[in-house]
Amino acid sequence: MAAISERAFFYLRRAPAERLPPPAARAGALGWLRVNLFSSPANIALTLLCGVGIVWAVPPLLRFFLTDAVWSGSDRAACLAAPEHPMPGACWPFVRVWFSYFVYGFYPTGERWRVDLFFVALAFGVAWLLWLSAPRRDIGALYFFVVLPILSFVLLHGAPLIGLSVVPTALWGGVLVTVIVATVGIVFSLPLGILLALARRSDLPVVRLAAVMFIEFVRGVPLITVLFMASVMLPLFVPEALAPDKLVRALVGVALFASAYMAEVVRGGLAAVPRGQYEAAQALGLTYWRTVGLVILPQALRVTLPNIVNTFIGLFKDTTLVFIVGIFDFLRTIEAARADPHWAAPTTSVTGYAVAALFYFVCCYGMSRYARGVEARLARAGRR
Amino acid sequence: MAERPNDARAAAPPAEVAVEVAGLHKWYGDFHVLRDINLKVARGERIVICGPSGGGKSTLLRCINRLEDWQRGRIVVDGVELTDDPKRILAVRRDVGMVFQQFNLFPHLTVLENCTLAPIWVRHMPKRAAEALAMDYLARVKIPDQANKYPARLSGGQQQRVAIARALCMNPNIMLFDEPTSALDPEMVKEVLDTMVELAADGITMLVVSHEMRFARQVADRVIFMDEGQIVEIGEPESFFDHPQHERARLFLQQILH
């Protein structure tokens, strides 16, 4: 009691307390290791466990895919076990020989430059749109959403008028189809999802009911069912001549399916925007659509960006399901190629699947990294 | 704010009565939140509305720009009767500025963009002109140097002054203030009230929900006391604060003055 009253019961500061720099962190690699990897018994145990896992998993993978892998050859013989080669690794010549099939499917060899041109045009548009400080992004958007679809159709489908022969979609395949399905799905699902999410929050009961029914129905049905319905049941109701192309039907199915999920993701973002934001915008005399477009959506999408990208990644991988209606996407081309008796070897399938895994991983991880970059940028802007 | 340029209102001479509320009733479910409100606010008049919380003050204010709707009665703002017609609602909202307790600035836009949003998208002003206008008003509320910051970087008092500037950028004839200082730290209340006092001196019609008695005495033409959804007493500030007539008002003033 005495100590307290002496020190703080009455007090008047006469000199300001010194402003000090923060204490220096323990520096050096050893300091870092100690703080991050060996700070407590549990941490030490986890560190050791992870170390064991790495030692157990990584060397065999490196051995299979690199050091023991077969790099040259013209048929299965190269990839089979031989006395000088008792445990052959990945069969890379198989991938090299079938590579163009993985990319183009059955697209006629002489016309494949059209697909290459499409890839270049698409990459250009994507880069323009995603590079946030690119010049004239409005023209970029115009290019991506108007010019590119027309250009792609002319290039890929063909236009006899300008000397491009028609290539029916049944011949399309591989990466080409995967990229088309994923791009169309992503590009359509976001705006459709936003509209559905807004409709679900609408004041008009009919609009709300329609949105809820659509979203709940689509979410309650597997994608495979949606694809089956689009490809098998539609022709039962629509005369064959009027029925759209098989690929188009699958595209519509994927886009509608993804938009139902996107709607729920966007709805979460919309719910995170405080009511006061609507009121402030409305009090300024902004119409509903301007309130939504200028005030609500920019905030809602920002909050929910990680979830949106998560949905895109899921959609990208779901595109593999279009094989069920007879479309040769990338994974299906690998499936087909690995059955080739010319290359039948114990390692062929594993090699093919490894290529597929690498392709999907690179694409999905790329999306994830890009989204994190945008998030970081938005966070910086918010703090400015 | 000597000039009020360029819009449709210039065609018709402004009505002498800025806001007219007649026989207004509103219910939230079974709860009768506004009961028989009758009020005429003359052009240029400054009105302070006070009363215990839950008395319907904010609700009444929010009816005037139709952020809330009502079940009975009518409200006429600058000669435009508010109905369900979205055109009328928008016309009134363009004419009536509002400042909220929680500021409600748009966090994804800079201070300047907050102020230019409505002039550009509602009044269709060119961006340059809107920015010049916004800088004018930001200078008037004494924070032109913060124009390119995001709202989160500003103090509460600064944010509220931005909110006032944002509303003024629409050149409103009427300003509504819904407890503009209640969410502020004590040392920031004065800067916001000073801004409002200056605004009052310009002759704009103001309806302010507030318990700031000094502000009310200094600025208000009339003080309205509301309780349980009714207007209980209307008087000049001096007579109301010094000699409230109604028992309920006397009790309330005792409570807040200790």
Image (cartoon, rainbow, N blue to C red):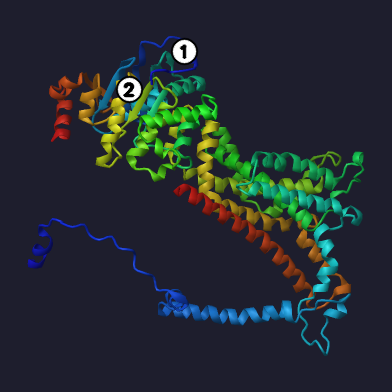
Q: Quadrant of the N terminus of chain A?
A: bottom left
Q: Position of residue A23 (x, y in %)?
A: 34, 68
Left/right placement of residue B6 relative to residue A14 reads right
Q: Position of residue A278 (x, y in %)?
A: 46, 35
Q: CA distance from mark 2 to mark 1?
A: 20 Å
Q: Give amino acid for label 2.
A: Met
Chain for disc number 2: B
Which structural element holds mark 2?
A: strand
What residue lies at 90% left-to-right and 40% top-to-bottom? A162
Q: Give amino acid for label 1.
A: Ala
Nearer to the camera, A231 or A118: A118
Which picture quadrant has residue A340?
Answer: bottom right
Which is closer to the viewer, label 2 or label 1? 1
Which picture quadrant has residue B182?
Answer: top left
Q: Position of residue B225 (x, y in %)?
A: 23, 24
A132 over B40 or under it: above or below:
below
Q: Position of residue B96 (x, y in %)?
A: 41, 23
Residue on which the image places disc 2: B206
Q: Which mark is residue B10?
A: 1
What residue lies at 86% left-to-right and 40% top-to-bottom? A241
Which structural element holds mark 1?
A: helix
Which picture quadrant has residue A101?
Answer: bottom right
Q: Which residue extends farthest left?
A: A2
Does residue B157 appear in this view? yes
Left/right placement of residue A195 relative to residue A160 reads left
A174 over A203 or under it: above or below:
below
